[in-house]
Image (cartoon, rainbow, N blue to C red):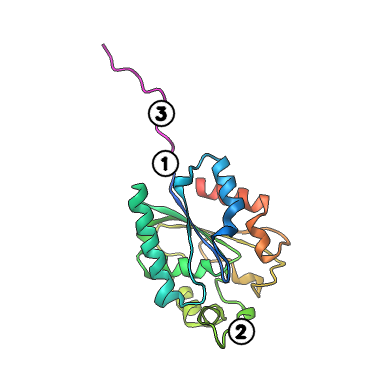
Amino acid sequence: GPAAAPIAGPIAARNPVVFVHGYNADPGVWGSLREALRADGYADSELFSFGYDTHQSVNEVLSGRLAAHVDEVRRQTGAARVDIVGHSFGSLVSRWYVKYGGGTAAVDHWVSLAGPNHGTSTAWACALWDQACRDMTPGSYVVKNLASGDETPGTVKYATFWSDCDEVVNPDSSVPLSGALNTPVGCLKHNDLLGDGATSAGVRAFLRS
């Protein structure tokens, strides 16, 4: 007779998510968004946090370490592509990987929460002794190269979420990127985007897009 119909249809294609935290932070900052994604049906085995020393160079060290981490996630999960969600400085590390480190082939959705994508004047306070701070200053080598040509290269889908009360990213207009879905979240502090319900809902809807 005919073969039995499968009990359930195929699970909707969903990429593993790689979280990239910001300067002087650690993977613990992702607790709220991780819980929200789990409530949406993600398994822990699909959620990965890249932990790293945030005082090193975006282009010379950190983007390469992220590339290796993404390769390992793809190997573990069998996924062709991952989604990346970065906060603050993590946005520069992950953008360099996408634009210059081969990430356009491995990344499907890329999200920046309060990323100093065009630099931030607050980074001058620590630029004298800290390479990552130098990388975040307006007009730095990293910022200039990320802005050159196409800010959102490849077939990657890009989104940014930015606050008009961000005390760390100055000016606030540093966050949005040409070619990205740029969403204002209202008046939130820099780290409050990590736990804000509306921002979380926006990120999750984008990852489903």
- Quadrant including the N terminus: top left
Q: Is residue 139 above or below residue 155?
A: below
Instruction: Tell me the residue at 57%/58% (across/down).
Output: 28
Query: Vertical placement of 203 versus 190: above or below?
Result: above
Per the image, label 2 sits on a secondary structure element best described as helix
Tell me, yes or no, whether the two marked residues, 2 and 1, touch with CB atoms within 8 Å: no
Q: Is residue 143 above or below residue 180?
A: below
Could you tell whether 81 is left or right of 139 in the image? left
Q: Is residue 33 visible?
A: yes
User: What is the span of residues highlighted in magenta in the rendered image?
Assistant: 1-13
| Residue that label 1 marks | 13
Residue type at mark 1? Ala
Q: Earlier in the sequence, mark 2 or mark 1?
A: 1
**Label 2 to label 3: alpha-carbon separation:** 54 Å
Query: Magenta region, mostly helix, strand or loop?
Result: loop
> For the residue labelled by badge 3, is the local secondary structure a helix, a strand or a loop?
loop
Q: Local crowd at mark 3 within 10 Å, few (<14), some, or many (≥20)? A: few
User: Which mark, residue 124?
Assistant: 2
Name the amino acid type tagged 3.
Gly
Residue 6, position as x, y percentages in the image: 37, 23
| Sequence-first tag of 2 and 3 | 3
Q: Residue furthest bottom?
A: 128
> Within 10 angstroms of label 2, few (less than 14), some, or many (20 or more) residues?
some
- Say if the magenta span includes residue 162: no
Quadrant hosting residue 165: bottom right
x and y percentages locating residue 32 in the rendered image:
62, 51
User: Which residue has dot 3 on it?
Assistant: 9
Q: Amino acid at mark 2?
A: Trp
Q: Is residue 3 left or right of residue 147?
A: left
Q: Secondary structure at mark 1?
A: loop
